[in-house]
Amino acid sequence: MKPKFGGIFMKKENSILFLGDVVPFKPFRFKNHFKTVFNLECPITRQGKPEPGKIILRVKENHLRDIFQGNLLCLSLGNNHILDFGKKGLESTLVELEKSKTKSFGLEIPSLGKTDPLIINFNEISIAFFSAVCQSTSPVIEVQNEIHLSLLDIEKLIIKIAEVRKLVQRIVVYIHWGIEESSYPAKEDILIARKLIDAGANIIIGSHAHAPQPIEKYNNGIIAYNLGNFIMPEFKNIPTYFSEKGLPQSTYSKKLMIWNRVSWGLIIDMDSLEFKVNKYISLFKRVILIPYSPLDKYLLLKKDPIDISFTDHLNKHMKKRKSFRKIIEFLYNPHIPERIRKHL
């Protein structure tokens, strides 16, 4: 399958590679010649107290420099895991980003002068980077009343976009949202993304769903509803749901399905807004560029959200995903109920 957009008039010097969720748990080898932006899905820290009562993520080593080889432009910290280890965990992360000479956006930290948007001059093209986190992702919203996530508030975001519109040439909004495991965006997310484009944003990039979702050209903008997992580990018996005393109350396991392993890399000429889409998969210690396949029907948004059958179509899709996951997980770790075991 070939996508219906090819970016034949793109200029490399004006182009940025946008990626989805990154948990940099290994020094992956990644061949890339574009300045890159992505969502850092966890803190990089050995410090901090785990947030009680939720699934938490972190990496202890900073492999960003090994993976991106000086091509990091900036990254989003706007997600539901970046504050999993509190203020100390975030401070460690910011120190590591400073070592990598990487700017970030997505957190309001008045004491450090950090607020959205982050404005960067890229090859004489001024770009504003916003982040917004949907509360449905169960984020830690603030820490000690000093550090705040930029939550998804449509009306406030539209006002901010209007304020900065005359100051920059391009506006990018990273949104942490979506139905986990789904290769289709929710109807509400489609309408929100289009509304933000109509309000003056040029590019909407989604993360959090852990599956690549459609990319569309809408009016004068580009919407990538979710780019998927660029780098994500398989989770096995990870201590989680910590108590107030910092003791784990449970463990978390999640096997990666094929839709968790592949992702889109969206390359956009920030001058012309021409773009193309790469398909990646992370295997062993490499991120590999792979060809499209019939499974990549999800790259195109074929159903209009106004269509009355859209929600039914999404529900059937999720039912199939859940059934497939149950079968695969049973094959890898069969658990036979005791009442059946007695008769074997």
Image (tube, helix red, strand yellow):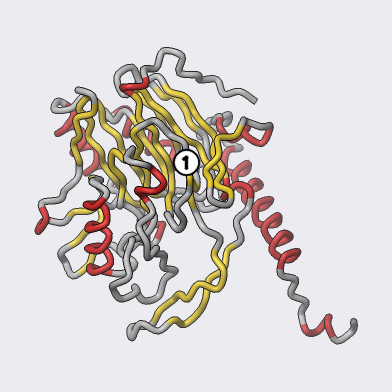
Relative placement, left or right, of 43 versus 224 is: left
The residue shown at (71%, 59%) is 328
The residue shown at (21%, 52%) is 98
How crowded pointer 1 is (Cα within 10 Å; few <14, some 14-19, many 20+) is rated as some
Q: Viewer-proximal residue, 286 or 37?
A: 286
Where residue 69 sits, quadrant-wise, is top left
Q: How many marks?
A: 1
Residue that extends furthest to the right in the rendered view of this protein:
344
Relative placement, left or right, of 125 versus 322 is: left
Residue tagged 1: 30
Q: Viewer-proximal residue, 120 or 51?
A: 120
Dot 1: what SS?
strand
Where residue 323 sits, quadrant-wise, is bottom right
Q: Viewer-proximal residue, 157 or 188?
A: 157
Residue that extends furthest to the top in the rendered view of this protein:
9
Quarter occupied by the C terminus = bottom right
The residue shown at (16%, 32%) is 164
Relative placement, left or right, of 276 versus 111 is: right
Q: Position of residue 103 (x, y in %)?
A: 23, 45
Quarter occupied by the N terminus = top right
Tell me the amino acid under the disc marked 1.
Phe
State whether residue 297 is above or below residue 185: above
Q: Position of residue 301 (x, y in %)?
A: 54, 31
Q: Position of residue 273 (x, y in %)?
A: 35, 21
Where residue 53 sits, quadrant-wise, is bottom left
Q: Position of residue 256 (x, y in %)?
A: 60, 56
The residue shown at (33%, 61%) is 44
